[in-house]
Amino acid sequence: TRQRVRMEDDVTIAQFLMIATTGVRDGGADKIDRFYKEFDNEYPDQERASDVVNSTLSIILDKVAPVISDTKLGTLPQLLMIFAAIAHRTTQIPQGDVEGQMPPAGTGLGDDQVIADNLQTLAAALEADEAPERFSTFVTRSATSTQRISSRQVRFRTFYEAMGNQAL
């Protein structure tokens, strides 16, 4: 059991590194295997990607985890896109497979209370029997195949907005 937990932790960190290195893309075990193979011998962006992962996870632990830990936003699929949104707002992640223009990079995060309120609003939308119209796509994509780019890009953009200074 301990070994399995360690392996899951390694896969999670690999997914964070993938986002920092290649942007938001389709997920899944085969994509993680390809990432490992591509950077098995040489990982030229490793230091920058590691810095992005470390700084973003620090923000998540400090500002986000207390708000989402007991909600549906606390699941790994949601956390990956929260990570991507914060990483893009605080540094910049590559375009990846996100369609259209990426939101502005390096704009910083909004006020802590606005972010907390926005995350609580999204969590409530996921819990609702009927999602509010403005969050229906987010809720639908959160319930579908969360590894696909069609789901990930909607959730990434929604979390990007949630991390700003405007109330959702």
Image (tube, rainbow, N blue to C red):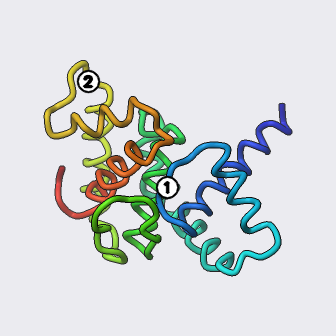
Report x, y in % for residue 99: 33, 59
Q: Which residue is mark 2?
A: 128
Report x, y in % for residue 29: 67, 43
User: SS class of the residue under badge 2?
Assistant: loop
Report x, y in % for residue 36: 74, 59
Is 156 drawn above or below residue 43 in the view shown?
Answer: above
Using residue 87 as the reference point, say whether residue 53 is left or right of it.
Answer: right
Instruction: State which tag comes first along the sequence, 1 or 2.
Output: 1
Q: Quadrant of residue 67?
A: top left
Tag 1 near tag 2, CB within 8 Å: no
Task: Give amino acid for label 1.
Answer: Arg
Task: Give amino acid for label 2.
Answer: Ala
**What residue lies at 42% left-to-right and 63% top-to-bottom?**
86
Tell which tag, 1 or 2, sits nearer the viewer.
Answer: 1
Question: Camera-side residue: 33 or 66?
Answer: 33
Given the current orientation, which residue lies at the most extreme top position? 129
**What residue lies at 37% left-to-right and 53% top-to-bottom?**
156
**What residue lies at 54% left-to-right and 66% top-to-bottom?**
22
User: SS class of the residue under badge 1?
Assistant: loop
In the picture, the quarter occupied by the N terminus is top right
Q: Which residue is mark 1?
A: 25
